[in-house]
């Protein structure tokens, strides 16, 4: 995995795209607009990392979804910026598997998903971001595959598996030999956690909620693991095209990206989320960059004030 680090000013910038929903190749005009949005945002923002939180393609009804996926990856790769992907529920509906997607990613120079751990067909991996001096890990990004459709038919969507929660706790321990030193971290996945429904849409929340939260019906405890581990400042997801809010829930910010794809439902202006981490600070700043040139929804997370339990 390519070594990422904070710049000389102690900053690390992430551009998050989500729900591209690119269709069959050759692409229609809406898909070309999506690719242009991505290229423009990356060129203007000059991020250190690009993250795509699922649903890169519409696989349903496409004869060759791997070709569509290949073109999207090629667009990302040509920017020269490292990128990280987590898969969404629409990526593997027909004629393609998670394994097919990962095999394609493994051939792409700038893709960071190559060294993940497969858990029941889902790829999970962490990305260390080193300090500007490269002497230590300054931040960590935890990337999880939140699954697709609920095969048990309890609800519509799957949940982060208990085995993935265990993976996260094991993975976090590799970065935290000293349990008192919490490395400020983020987590990215596609489908929102049930806790997103508990966000109080008050003046402390930035952004819009224009549709119901489409989370799984069952709660597998990932938020609780994040809370007790204490290093993850925020989670960022996609999935709900008409939501883009960020809000603090018991010390952890639960946030959405902004829908980026033009070939899918949703009334929001398409765009990207920009997230800036500050070296050795348990805080971040974020805003949305829209396809019409506007910037909106600035949000800042400050260090949690929750009490530590001494055992």
Image (cartoon, grey):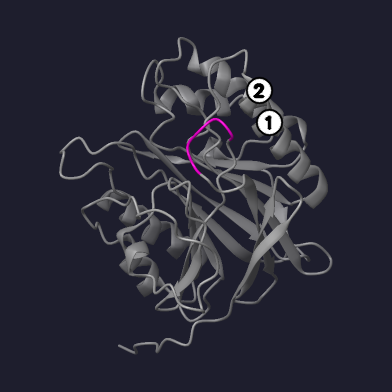
Which residue is located at x 62 percent, y 13 percent? 26
Q: Residue at x 64, y 49 (%)?
A: 272
Q: Which corner quadrant of the image does residue 194 belong to?
A: bottom left
Q: Residues within 10 Å of mark 1 (few under 14, many from 20)?
A: some
Q: Quadrant of residue 124?
A: top left
Count up the numbered dots: 2
Q: Main secondary structure of the magenta part?
A: loop
Q: Is residue 109 above or below residue 258?
A: above
In the rendering, at what x and y percent does residue 2 appear?
68, 44
Q: Are marks 2 and 1 in contact (CB under 8 Å)?
A: yes
Horizontal side, residue 152 vs residue 20: left or right? left
> Which residue reaches farthest top?
63
Please give the residue where the numbered disc 2 appears in the rendered image: 29
Vertical comparison of 255 with 293: above or below: below
Magenta highlight range: 262-266
Nearest the viewer among 7 and 207 is: 207
Most foreground residue, 77 or 155: 155
Marks 2/1: CA distance?
Answer: 6 Å
Q: Residue 65: where, in percent of width, then height?
A: 49, 17
Q: Is residue 200 magenta?
A: no
Q: Which residue is mark 1?
A: 33
Image coordinates of residue 131 in percent, x first then y, are 71, 66
Vertical placement of residue 44 versus 287, above or below? above
Within the image, what quadrant is residue 197 found in?
bottom left
- Say which mark, if any, is on residue 263: none
């Amino acid at each position: 995995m390519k070594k990422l680090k904070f710049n000389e000013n102690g900053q690390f910038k992430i551009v998050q795209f989500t729900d591209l929903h690119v269709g069959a190749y050759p692409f229609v005009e809406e898909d070309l607009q999506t690719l242009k949005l991505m290229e423009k945002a990356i060129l203007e923002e000059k991020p250190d990392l690009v993250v795509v939180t699922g649903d890169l393609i519409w696989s349903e009804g496409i004869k060759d979804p791997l070709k569509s996926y290949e073109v999207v990856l090629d667009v990302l790769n040509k920017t020269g910026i490292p990128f990280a992907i987590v898969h969404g529920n629409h990526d593997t509906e027909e004629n393609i598997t998670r394994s097919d997607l990962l095999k394609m990613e493994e051939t792409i120079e700038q893709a960071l998903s190559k060294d993940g751990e497969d858990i029941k067909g889902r790829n999970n991996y962490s990305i260390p971001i080193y300090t500007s001096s490269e002497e230590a890990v300054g931040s960590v990004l935890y990337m999880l595959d939140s699954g697709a459709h609920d095969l048990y038919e309890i609800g519509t969507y799957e949940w982060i598996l208990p085995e993935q929660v265990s993976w996260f706790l094991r993975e976090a321990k590799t970065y935290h030999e000293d349990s008192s030193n919490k490395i400020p971290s983020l987590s990215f996945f596609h489908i929102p956690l049930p806790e997103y429904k508990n966000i109080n849409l008050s003046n402390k929340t930035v952004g819009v909620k224009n549709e119901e939260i489409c989370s799984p019906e069952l709660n597998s405890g990932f938020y609780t693991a994040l809370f007790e581990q204490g290093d993850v400042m925020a989670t960022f997801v996609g999935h709900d095209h008409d939501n883009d809010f960020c809000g603090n829930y018991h010390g952890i910010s639960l946030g959405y990206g902004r829908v980026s794809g033009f070939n899918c439902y949703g009334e929001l202006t398409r765009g990207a989320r920009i997230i800036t981490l500050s070296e050795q600070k348990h805080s971040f700043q974020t805003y949305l960059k829209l396809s019409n040139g506007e910037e909106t929804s600035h949000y800042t997370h400050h260090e949690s004030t929750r009490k530590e339990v001494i055992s």
